[in-house]
Amino acid sequence: MLRIGGENGHVKESVDEPVFIAVYNTFRWKMIKNFTGRFTCRDHGIVSQMTPLQLIINSLVVNDAKTNSLKQYYYTFEDQSKNPMIVIPFTEEHQTGLITYVKESVVEDNCQYVHTLNAPSGFQRKLEAMKVYLCDENKI
């Protein structure tokens, strides 16, 4: 059980989802100001080259079955100023998950990833705010 939040306007909550806990404990995260239940990675220099699945795999000791069962969804937006994103819910109920923004480089032939870790109080709220609904047509 992991207890998070409770400061700077964030709600205090407990998370017992194993993938969330592993990712949270492997890297350094900070709460996103005014967005309760959402965290951004302080280890950006390390994780910005990792795909979302690589970030998760690097967080788990050995759990191929859990990693293989995770579903990934890819979304682009009509508004070109919004970066594409990859969403990985950690449970079938979509209570917690990773939302990763894909920043493509015009100069180089690669991209960088901005990972946000989302607790129950932030995950669905952020997806709804972005008008993102997890459906099979966006599964990758």
Image: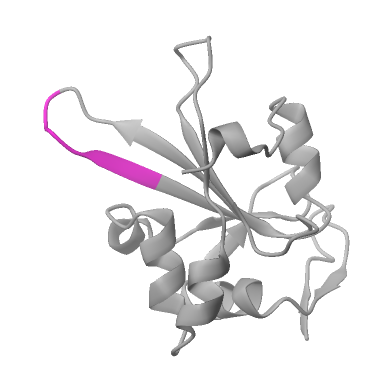
- Residue 108, image quadrant: top left
The structure residue drawn at horizontal position 37% and vertical position 56%, both measured from the top left corner, is: 44
Asked if one can make out residue 28 in the rendered structure from this viewpoint, the answer is no
- Residue 67 rendering spot, x and y as whole percentages: 50, 72
The structure residue drawn at horizontal position 86% and vertical position 69%, both measured from the top left corner, is: 13
Image check: 96 left or right of 112?
Answer: right
- Residue 123 rendering spot, x and y as whole percentages: 74, 49
- Residue 71 rendering spot, x and y as whole percentages: 56, 55
- Residue 48 rendering spot, x and y as whole percentages: 33, 52
- Residue 42, image quadrant: bottom left
Q: Looking at the image, is 128 positioned above or below residue 36? A: above
Image check: 51 left or right of 28?
Answer: left
Residue situated in front as seen by the camera: 29 or 133:
133
**Which residue extends farthest bottom?**
61
Q: Looking at the image, is 83 positioned above or below residue 21? A: above
- Quarter that holds the N terminus: bottom right
Asked if one can make out residue 73 in the rendered structure from this viewpoint, the answer is yes
Q: Provide the residue span drawn in magenta.
A: 107-113
Q: Looking at the image, is 39 positioned above or below residue 108? A: below
Residue situated in front as seen by the camera: 7 or 19:
19
The structure residue drawn at horizontal position 78% and vertical position 32%, both measured from the top left corner, is: 128
- Residue 109 lies in the magenta stretch: yes
- Residue 75 lies in the magenta stretch: no
The structure residue drawn at horizontal position 18% and vertical position 38%, both measured from the top left corner, is: 110
**Which residue extends farthest front?**
136
Q: Looking at the image, is 58 positioned above or below residue 6? A: below
